[in-house]
Image (spheres, helix red, strand yellow):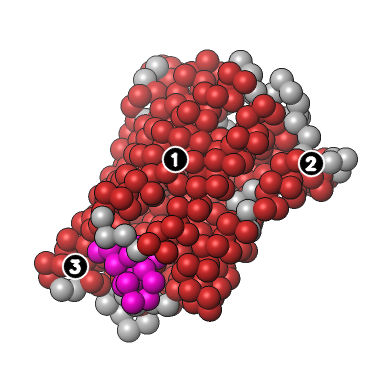
């Protein structure tokens, strides 16, 4: 009987769960990394504090390789996914309950910190489950579906939810209440996903607790030793850590710049307008850029595309120098500038993703890719921590000029890094 149930579960269409799994994977990351910035800006928190403390929330993604073996050792990946989704839903509800507290900033940060750890762990379990529940051909067929629904979650979070928060705040005059409603909605969505996945996720036979051998610790540390013993490790570290040095600082100050009034050097947009311009138009442009970048690498290979993509990530940062100098009032013009920057970032970031796949290739592919993503998160966390202080010291216009100068190390590393000429081609 049990075998028949297992076979029936295996026959479930991936369309029943792949879109919802990766839509859900994006939501807590969007909340922690993007919505928290807008929420704190609406509540009057300074740019210095926003950049510093929300950058610390990157830490779980930086160090997640350290506990990724635990997902293998204890329980099934299916169980990890369901349990973590319940915890994330509960955490979102707790954030909603903090918005009217006198110590809102500290309390909400504590909950977001726990959510960040849960989200980073959920990423490990969900990606591992995806590889176990689908055959290799299915994995390739649904990789585009994964990406699409992950981006749709970004639009829903940074676009629709931010617009809703702005509309509720304008109607009621209570910003805290508006963000409380948004977080309760997201909590309900996530708890719904938890119960839905408990019903529909298949139970692949290969999804079981890993056997613990006597040399487990040797294997565990061997994965790190193999990665850091590469002869070109310094080039690998330099490229990954500097690729987004400018972007790491820029991304923390985009929303404050869009929302700050003209007298402070900002564009004076409302929360609703930020949701439309940055969370909808920007994310759509980011998605289109990513699709084009992946296609171009598949046709020409990573080596031939590298310089074009490094330039595409960094040169569009100049649009913020223009915006901070001209301070335009046209929402269409501002949207066009944001679209150019986000399209370039999505297009060029494909190079980093493919580079990490190339570096991770080998007997420790999964673990080495996790190390690469952790290093990439570190390259975002540390520069972002101090970006708010820099901006408040020199103003938006000079800050964006500084961001453009901070992209120079990425160009230097692109000239030094070693890439197989055939890597990435179909």
Q: Quadrant of residue 223?
A: top right
Residue at label 3?
Answer: 169
Residue 56 seen in the figure:
no
Residue at label 2?
Answer: 416
Which of the two marks, 3 or 2, is nearer to us in this view?
2
Which of the two marks, 3 or 1, is nearer to us in this view?
1
Disc 1/disc 2 C-alpha distance (Å) = 26 Å
User: Residue farthest to the left?
Assistant: 171
Question: What SS does tag 1 mark?
Answer: helix
Q: Position of residue 2 (x, y in %)?
A: 43, 22
**Residue at figure coordinates x 41%, y 33% from the top left:** 288
The reply, left or right, for residue 402 in relation to residue 320 is right
Q: Position of residue 267 (x, y in %)?
A: 33, 65
Circle nearer the N terminus (3, 1): 3
Disc 3/disc 2 C-alpha distance (Å) = 50 Å
Residue at label 1?
Answer: 343
Q: Position of residue 97 (x, y in %)?
A: 29, 70
Look at the image and give the residue range highlighted in magenta: 257-270
Q: Which quadrant does the C terminus fall into?
A: top right
**Residue at figure coordinates x 65%, y 36% from the top left:** 307
Circle nearer the N terminus (1, 2): 1
Disc 3/disc 1 C-alpha distance (Å) = 30 Å
**Residue at figure coordinates x 61%, y 41% from the top left:** 310
260 in the magenta segment: yes
């Amino acid at each position: 009987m049990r075998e028949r149930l297992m076979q029936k579960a295996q026959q479930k269409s991936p369309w029943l769960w792949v879109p919802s799994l990766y839509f859900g994977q994006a939501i807590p990351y969007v909340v922690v990394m993007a919505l928290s910035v807008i929420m704190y800006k609406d509540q009057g928190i300074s740019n210095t504090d926003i950049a510093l403390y929300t950058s610390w929330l990157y830490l779980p993604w930086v160090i997640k390789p350290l506990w990724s073996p635990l997902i293998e050792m204890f329980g099934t990946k299916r169980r990890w996914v369901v349990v973590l989704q319940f915890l994330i839903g509960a955490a979102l509800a707790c954030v909603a309950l903090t918005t009217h507290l006198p110590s809102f900033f500290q309390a909400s940060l504590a909950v977001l910190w726990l959510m960040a750890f849960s989200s980073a762990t959920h990423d490990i379990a969900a990606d591992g489950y995806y590889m176990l529940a689908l055959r290799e051909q299915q994995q390739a067929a649904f990789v585009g579906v994964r990406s699409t629904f992950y981006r749709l979650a970004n639009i829903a979070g940074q676009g629709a939810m931010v617009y809703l928060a702005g509309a509720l705040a304008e109607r009621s005059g209570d910003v805290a209440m508006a963000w409380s409603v948004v977080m309760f909605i997201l909590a309900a969505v996530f708890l719904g996903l938890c119960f839905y996945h408990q019903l529909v996720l298949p139970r692949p036979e290969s999804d079981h607790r890993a056997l613990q051998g006597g040399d487990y610790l040797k294997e565990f540390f061997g994965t790190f030793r193999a990665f850091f013993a590469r002869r070109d490790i310094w080039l690998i570290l330099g490229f990954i850590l500097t690729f987004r040095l400018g972007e790491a600082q820029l991304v923390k100050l985009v929303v404050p710049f869009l929302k700050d009034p003209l007298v402070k050097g900002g564009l004076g947009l409302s929360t609703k307008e930020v949701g439309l311009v940055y969370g909808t138009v920007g994310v759509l442009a980011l998605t289109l850029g990513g699709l084009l970048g992946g296609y171009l690498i598949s046709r020409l290979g990573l080596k031939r595309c590298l310089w074009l993509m490094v330039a595409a990530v960094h040169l569009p940062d100049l649009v913020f120098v223009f915006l901070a100098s001209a301070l335009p009032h046209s929402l269409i013009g501002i949207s066009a500038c944001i679209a150019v920057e986000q399209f370039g970032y999505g297009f060029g970031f494909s190079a980093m993703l493919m580079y990490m796949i190339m570096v991770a290739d080998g007997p420790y592919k999964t673990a080495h890719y996790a190390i690469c993503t952790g290093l990439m998160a570190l390259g975002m966390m540390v520069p972002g921590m101090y970006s708010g202080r820099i901006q408040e010291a020199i103003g938006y216009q000079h800050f964006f000029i500084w961001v453009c100068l901070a992209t120079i190390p990425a160009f230097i590393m692109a000239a030094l890094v070693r890439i197989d000429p055939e890597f990435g081609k179909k």
